[in-house]
Image: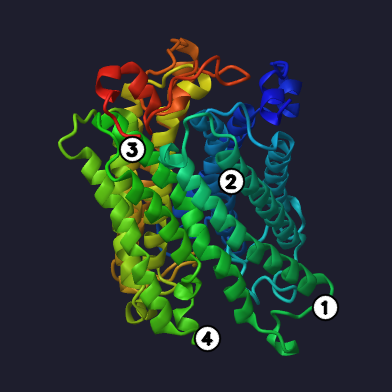
């Protein structure tokens, strides 16, 4: 009997707590990833609100400099390593087998192992706050020599290294699963050029993980050796080189930006056609653009190192400009999909539109700082903070909420309330832009990032007060989402298999899906098998 057949006839899992803790079902593991990443998001968001409250007024003493360093280290680490990427991993865990017509992931036990490594890694990072010196305080980038034992002596920094290492290994193992599952376990008729865009984006993301994450793991091991075994790889006083850390970290870090955004390109590519009532425009172009972004991203790590004097600025500037081209192709295709479509502004679509608007601004400022003369002025200022948050907050975070509202019925069998959903969107959209747009101006005026206070000069007090007020509005948006979950769960109006009249295979099975995913499959004759099954008169002459 084949592995697929063995999984298809596996007995149903237990529904109690022990069943969830011991499950290898991709849907449960995906759900655990999603819930865990949302938990870390709430913690990271609370840390951000404390930081913004500290920065609301000049010369504030709400928190000490050391406490502030711990806050922004944990906030950045959580959002980068424990929220945005793991949410995409969880979503892909849940969706990829369903989208390609498979009963489970290729390696179910490895899949479960990856989740528990991620969970324990994240907890290890935060448990460093309970040590005598407190949590890690050298920033989420852990630049040497700030992270060397001479400066950061606490156990919290060591726990940060161990925790992030566990998360990086878990991510590599998950990437193996995604690629194997997508290529090997496709249902009959699911040819490569019928695979949903989200699954393609996860394949490109997984290839990036293979190439980039080993560099992070090696850097973390070297840093641990430096701190405890006398390695001195990053200690210039012993012949080491602190810039080596930047090379190793950003060789991971810039591809990581696309690990954080490519899955969400897939999310909006799945949602926009559904609410435009059109097939995706330029399917092939979207797939090729994803792999072009993945390839180019491996050559732009020194985009973050223009001011070090240790890299070839014109070469890396050129590649940084080039990577905007395939991203522009994707924007063109999304707009082409909406063009003359019958657009319905349901909550998932609203978040996708918010994604497009915010990410566009983040992309424009990214092109600006790809120019070394501009980057020399903007580096280590609040302009960089604004740029990064418009890409990953205005981009990835808005796509996360789009995914939650879109696939919540499939995951939990109930639909989130639309009125509360739209309230959540507007609070987050307005709050986000009030928070982060003023930071562009702060950076232009010269306010450095990673400072716990600032003098009462120029527009610093006004702009920081605006940013803090915006963070409170965003907090209200998160509360609105949480209340929506409570209300919808209590109301418990069941939904059918396909409440959105969507396109891909996950909408063929029940909501939530059974243990074995499918009782039957529709004929797969295009990239929209569920739409074809519901509208055979349209699909008769459809694409193959």
Q: CA distance from mark 2 to mark 4?
A: 36 Å
Crowdedness near tag 2: few (<14), some (14–19) or many (≥20) residues, C-alpha within 10 Å = many
Depth order, front residue of 208/80: 208
Q: What residue would you read off at disc 3?
A: 351
Specify whether residue 466 is in view: no
First in sequence, mark 2 or 1: give its number: 2
Residue 80, how many percent across, how many down?
Answer: 54, 53
Q: Name the element at disc 1.
A: loop
Q: CA distance from mark 3 to mark 4?
A: 41 Å
CB under 8 Å between discs 4 and 1 = no
Q: What residue would you read off at disc 4?
A: 310
Specify whether residue 278 is in view: yes
In the picture, the quarter occupied by the C terminus is: top left
Q: Of tags 2 and 3, which is closer to the observer?
A: 2
Q: Name the element at disc 3.
A: helix
First in sequence, mark 4 or 1: give its number: 1
Please tell me which residue is depicted at 50% across the width and 71% down the height of the picture: 301
Residue 136, how many percent across, how many down?
Answer: 67, 60
Please tell me which residue is depicted at 49% across the width and 77% down the height of the picture: 305
First in sequence, mark 3 or 4: give its number: 4
Q: Of tags 4 and 1, which is closer to the observer?
A: 4
Q: What residue would you read off at disc 2?
A: 179
Crowdedness near tag 1: few (<14), some (14–19) or many (≥20) residues, C-alpha within 10 Å = few
Q: What residue would you read off at disc 1?
A: 230
Residue 28, how many percent across, how many down?
Answer: 63, 27
CB under 8 Å between discs 3 and 4 = no
């Amino acid at each position: 009997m084949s592995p697929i057949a063995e999984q298809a006839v596996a007995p149903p899992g237990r529904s109690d707590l022990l069943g969830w803790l011991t499950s290898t079902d991709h849907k449960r593991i995906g759900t655990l990833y999603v819930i865990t990443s949302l938990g870390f998001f709430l913690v990271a968001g609370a840390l951000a609100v404390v930081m913004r409250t500290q920065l609301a007024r000049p010369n504030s003493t709400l928190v000490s400099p050391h406490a502030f360093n711990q806050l922004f280290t944990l906030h950045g680490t959580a959002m980068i390593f424990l929220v945005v990427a793991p949410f995409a991993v969880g979503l892909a865990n849940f969706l990829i087998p369903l989208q390609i017509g498979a009963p489970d992931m290729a390696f179910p036990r490895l899949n479960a192992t990856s989740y528990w490594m991620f969970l324990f890694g994240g907890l290890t990072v935060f448990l460093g706050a309970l040590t005598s010196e407190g949590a890690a305080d050298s920033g989420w980038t852990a630049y040497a020599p700030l992270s060397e034992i001479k400066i950061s002596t606490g156990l919290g920094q060591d726990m940060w290294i161990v925790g992030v290492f566990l998360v990086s290994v878990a991510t590599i193992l998950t990437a193996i699963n995604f690629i194997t599952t997508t290529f090997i376990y496709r249902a009959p008729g699911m040819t490569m050029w019928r695979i949903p865009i989200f699954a393609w984006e996860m394949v490109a993301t997984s290839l990036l993980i293979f190439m980039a994450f080993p560099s992070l793991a090696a850097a973390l091991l070297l840093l641990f050796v430096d701190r405890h075994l006398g390695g001195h790889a990053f200690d210039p006083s012993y012949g080491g080189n602190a810039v080596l850390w930047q090379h190793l970290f950003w060789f991971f870090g810039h591809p990581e930006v696309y690990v954080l955004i490519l899955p969400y390109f897939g999310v909006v590519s799945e949602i926009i056609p559904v609410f435009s009532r059109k097939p995706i425009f330029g399917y092939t172009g979207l797939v090729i653009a994803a792999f072009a972004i993945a390839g180019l991203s491996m050559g732009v790590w020194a985009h973050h190192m223009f001011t070090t004097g240790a890299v070839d600025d014109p070469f890396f500037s050129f590649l940084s400009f080039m990577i905007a081209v395939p991203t522009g192709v994707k924007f063109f295709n999304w707009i082409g999909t909406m063009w003359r479509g019958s657009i319905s502004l349901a909550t998932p679509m609203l978040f996708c539109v918010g994604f497009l608007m915010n990410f566009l601004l983040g992309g424009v400022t990214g092109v600006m700082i790809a120019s070394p003369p501009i980057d020399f002025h903007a580096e280590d200022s609040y302009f960089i903070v604004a740029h990064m948050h418009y890409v990953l907050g205005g981009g990835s975070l808005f796509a996360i909420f789009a995914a939650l509202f879109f696939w919540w019925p499939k995951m939990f069998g109930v639909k989130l309330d639309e009125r509360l959903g739209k309230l959540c969107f507007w609070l987050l959209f307005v709050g986000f832009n009030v928070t982060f747009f003023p930071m562009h101006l702060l950076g232009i005026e010269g306010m450095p990032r990673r400072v716990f206070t600032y003098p009462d000069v120029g527009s610093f007090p006004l702009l920081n007060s605006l940013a803090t007020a915006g963070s409170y509005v965003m907090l209200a948006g998160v509360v609105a989402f949480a209340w929506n979950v409570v209300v919808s769960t209590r109301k418990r109006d069941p939904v059918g298999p396909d409440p959105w009249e969507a396109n891909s295979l996950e909408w063929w099975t029940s909501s939530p899906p059974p243990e074995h995913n499918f009782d039957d499959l529709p004929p797969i004759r295009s990239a929209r098998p569920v739409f074809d099954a519901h509208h055979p008169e349209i699909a008769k002459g459809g694409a193959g």
